Amino acid sequence: MIQIRAIGKLKNSTPEAQLIGEYLRKIHEKVEIREYVEKKSLSDGEIKEAEAKLLLSDLPENAFIIALDEHGQTQSSREFACQLKKAKEDAKNIILMIGGANGHGQEVLKRANLILSFGRMTLPHFLIRVVLAEQLYRAISIWNNHPYHRD
């Protein structure tokens, strides 16, 4: 199972939600999205820690955690596909975590098996979900030697 856990709710009628839906419908793997409500009445540090608890709650056994973070390592699409495939073979459950506007709390970063960045530019959290959905589709296309990905 592949699961995306994200802070913030995305309305189904948005263009981002429609694009995410398009990519996820093409994937022949079960991909679940869990969204968590942002905690806005706390300080920035408290928000990060509260959001970390939400993201880490109820983890499946043997979960391979990938935290998306601006300070993480960058990978090519092919490297990402290989990392996902190995994680799927070893762990069976892959959880990709997108933090809130303040980033991830330390507990998420400590628990993560991989801290991944999609580049040095700052992107809106809802747009990162689209990029992640596309990269998941691309990774699975690479696994299956589908012509969607070209080197």
Image: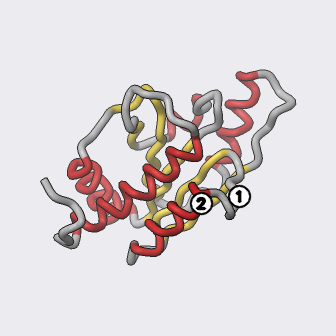
Going from N to C along the chain, the mark reached first, 2 or 1, is: 1
Q: What element carries label 2?
A: helix
> Which scheme is used to colour this image of the protein?
secondary structure
- Along the line of sight, which residue is nearer the eye, 114 or 4? 4
Residue bearing the label numbered 2: 17
Q: Position of residue 144 (x, y in %)?
A: 21, 72
Asked if residue 92 is positioned above or below residue 38 in the image, the reply reads: below
x and y, in percent, of residue 107 in the image: 59, 34
- Could you tell me residue 53's position as x and y percent? 69, 42
Image point 40% across, 35% down: which residue? 117
CA gap, disc 2 to disc 1?
7 Å
Q: What element carries label 1?
A: loop
Residue 59, placed above or below residue 51:
below
Residue 72 position by quadrant: top left
Query: As drawn, is 115 to the left or to the right of 125?
Result: left
Classify 120 as above or below 15.
above
Q: For the point 69% across and 32% down, which residue is it?
A: 49
Label 1: how many Cα within 10 Å (few below 14, some 14–19, many 20+): few
In the picture of the structure, the residue carrying the numbered disc 1 is 11
Q: Is disc 2 surrounded by few (<14), some (14 to 19) or many (20+) residues within 10 Å?
A: some
Kindly identify which numbered label has been placed on residue 107.
none
Residue 58, by quadrant, is bottom right
Residue sitting at 38 percent across and 38 percent down?
118
Q: Pick the residue in front: 108 or 20.
A: 20
| Amino acid marked by disc 2 | Ala
